[in-house]
Amino acid sequence: MSDPAVPLTLGSRILSADGYAVVTDLERHGVRLRFSTGEDRSVTFTQLQARSIGDDGPQAVHVSLFPWWLQLEDSVRREALFKQECVLEARTGFRFGLRELAQPGEPFYPFGHDFGLSLAARYREMSKVVSFERFTDRAVMRRVYDGELQDHRIAPRTLQRWDNLWASGGLRRLVDGRAIKGRQAFDVIDADFRRLALEKFAQYDGSKSRPNLQEIERQIRVALKNEGITDPHLPDRITQEFLSYHWRATGSSVRAQRSKSLRRVAGHQSYPAQHPSELATDLTIANNFVLDPLRERAINVEVGVIHSIATRVIHGIRVFPRGARGIDVGLLIYDAMRQFAMVVDGTTIDDFRWCGIPESLDLGGNPVHIGRRPTVKRDLTIQGVHYLPGVAPTSLRSDHGSIFVGEHFRALLNHFGIELRLSRGKKPTDNPHSERKMEDLERAYQQVPGYKGRSIHQRGRFIGIEADEPLLTADELERHFRRWVALDYHRMPHDGLTLPGAPGIRLTPLEMHDALADATGRILVPQHPDLLYQFLPIIWLSPGHAGVEHKNLTYDAAVLEDFRSVRPGTFRAQDSAIPFHIDPRDVTRLWFRHPDTDRIHEVPWKARHLIHAPLGDVVRDRALERIKERGGNRSINKTRVMRQIIDEIGELTAAPTTDEWRSKLAAAQMRWEQSQRDHAEVADAHRQLEEQAAAGLPRIRGAEGNTTVDRAQDSSFDFDAPLPDYDGEAI
C-alpha cells in the first residue's frame, strides 16, 4: 500500500472490478476478502492501493482497477459507484452488496431476497426511490434546469440495463464509455505476466540493487518462457504503463524501497494500549553535537526516551555517550517510576526534582471526565509547577537492540514484573510510537546550538565549534530536553489523543494521563528513596578485617563491622558472601543494604580520597591491564596495588595518549557525572525524610515546598505503602 494514512482493519471496504469486498481476516502478507459476488479469496498487500474516495468511500482499490480507475474524473467515478450501489441494493438488499457492510436499517423493503419480490418489481421500487432522491438533490435539478439533463427521473428499464451491464462486466461496464475512450485496465494483460511482475517488484525491498525497467521486463519475459508460456497477450502501451506504475511504486531509492516494504509487513491494527503503564522505549543518535570538554571538540551522543503509548507522556529522557549499555537504559525505567516537578518562577527555571509521593494525579490542572464532554481550558502561561508523572510499568515495547535483550536489562524487567514486547529486527514500524517520539524531538534539537540535521543532506558546512557555536555539554542537552518536555511537548495538543464520544477534541499528553487516571483509578508507583539501587548490578563479596575486595580495590565502612565473619548461609546457602550493589559508572564505592534496617549504606574505596578523577569500570579495568602488561600477574599484590592503581589512573586521566582513549575517557566522565546526580537525588530524598520525621510532621517536600498530607495518627511516612486512591477530588 502506498498510503499508510488509510489503514486496513477487519471490516474495511475494498473496491474491486467485481464490486465491493470486505476484509474478513488479516494475514501475514495480505488480507482475506469476501466479495459481493459471494467469493472468498486472499490478496496480497501489493495488490491493493490505499485510497479513500469521498467521505464514505472505500479504504482501498484492488489492483484490477488501478491505475485505470484512479485516472478517471471524480464525477465519472461517483456516477459509476452510484449505479453499482443501486444494482447491489436491488439484488442483495445492501448498498455495498454484503451483509458485513450493512448500513443502518438495511435491508429496506422490498430490496434483496428477504421480501420475496421479483428483480423487476424491485427495480420498479428502486426507480421511485432514486427519482425522489434526485428530485431533492439541488445539484441534479440545476443540471436539469440548465438543459444538461433531460429529466431527473430514472426509469425501471434504465436500472435493468445497469443490472445487465454489471452482470456482464462488473464496475468497468458501468463507467460512461465517453469517459474511458482509449483506456484499458491492467487485467487485459496476461495474468501470468502480471503475477511474475508483481513477484519481481516485491523483491526490491531495499536489500538489493534494482536494475533499470528494461532489464526487469526482460527478466519477466525470460521467466514466462521458463514456465512454458510462449505467446502471452501483452498490449504494448498498457503493458508499459503497468510496469512503469509498479516501478514507481517500489520507490526511487533504496531507502524508499525499504520504507515501502516495511509498510507492507507492518501491523494493520493499533497496539491496544489502554493504560498509562504500558510503555515503549527507544535509543537513537542525537541530531545535535555536544561539547567534549576533554578534547574540546564536537561529539555525537545518544538519546534514550521512555514514554506511555496510551497517553504519549514522556516519563524519562536521558543523554548517553555512544555505545549505551544495559544499565543506562535501565535507568530510563527508574526515571519512569518517579514523579518529577519543575518550577518556573519569572525567568528562573528549576531543574526537575523528585517529588516523592504525588498528592494528586491531576497533572494538567484540567479535569477531563470519561463519558462527559471534556471542557479543556488551557493555561497559556508557563509560570508555576510542571509535573512529570511516574508510573509502575506493566509492559515495555522496544526494538531488538542488544542492550534490550541483555542479561542485566532482562533481569530488571523480571524483578519488577514488566513484560518485554520486542519488535522484529529491522522493522521500525513495529514500534511506531517510539519512532514518532524521536521525530517529535526534532523540534527540541533545533532550539539549541549544534544542530546537524536529520541526515547528511541537511547538514551545513560548518557545525558546532567550526561554526563558532557555543555547544552544550551532554548534561546541558539533557536538561534542555527535560525543559522542552515540560514546557512544550506536554502542553501541546496531540493529534493521536482523543476521547470516545468527543473525536473533535485534541488533548495534551498530561490531559490524556488525567483522563485515563480517571478511568483506571489507582496507580501504584514505587516511592522508596533507595529505589535506585534496585537498578544496579549485585556482586557477592566476603568481608574480612580489611574490608571487601573487588577487582583489586578494597572497600570498607563501619556498617560492615557486624558482617566481617558471618556464618555461611546467612545471605546465601553456599558461602559467607554478602550482596553489594555496584554502579559501573562510579566504582569508587559500593552500596550495602542492611538486613535489619533495610537502609542502603555507602561503602567507599579506601583510596577514594587520593584521586580526583572520574573512576568508572572502563578506567579501572584499563589501569589493571596496564599494570599486568608491565609486570604480569605478580605485579598486582595487596601491598602495592593501591599505589599502582592510583598512579595508573592519574596517567590515564591526566594525559590520554590516543584519540580512542580520549573518547572512552569522555564517555566515562559523562557516565560518572550522571551517577553523581542520581546518587545525590537519593541522598536528598533521605534528607527530606529525616527532616520530616524530626519535625514530627507527615510532610512530603515537593517542588513548591512542604505540603501536608493528612494522617490519622502515625507521624512517620511509609515509603513502601501503596499510593492512596485518587478517584476523588484533587487536593
Image (cartoon, grey):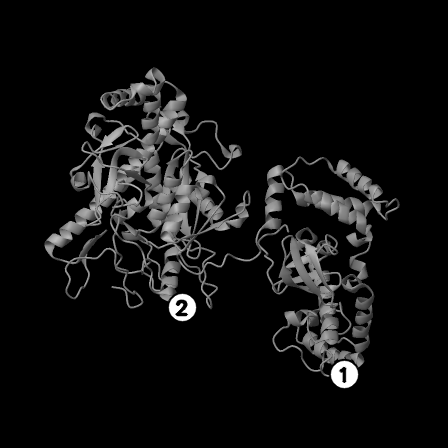
Amino acid type for the residue under numbered disc 1? Leu
Q: State the residue lying farthest toward the left.
A: 695
Res 639 quadrant in image: top left
Earlier sequence position, callout 2 versus callout 1: 1
Q: Is residue 444 visible?
A: no
- Position in image of residue 265 (x %, y %): 60, 50
Q: Nearer the viewer, residue 418 or 637?
A: 637
Q: Residues within 10 Å of mark 2 (few under 14, many from 20)?
A: some
Res 212 quadrant in image: top right
Amino acid type for the residue under numbered disc 2? Ile
Above or below for 171 versus 102 = above
Give residue 117's mark: 1
What residue do we see at 44% from left, 62% from top? 505
Q: Is residue 520 visible?
A: yes
Residue on which disc 2 sits: 370
Total numbered labels placed on residues in the image: 2
- Position in image of residue 643 (x %, y %): 23, 21
Q: Nearer the viewer, residue 708 or 151?
A: 708
Q: Which quarter of the image is occupied by the C terminus? A: bottom left
Res 618 quadrant in image: top left
- Position in image of residue 670 (x %, y %): 33, 33
- Position in image of residue 69 (x %, y %): 73, 56
Q: Nearer the viewer, residue 293 or 431?
A: 431
Q: State the residue lying farthest toward the right.
A: 231
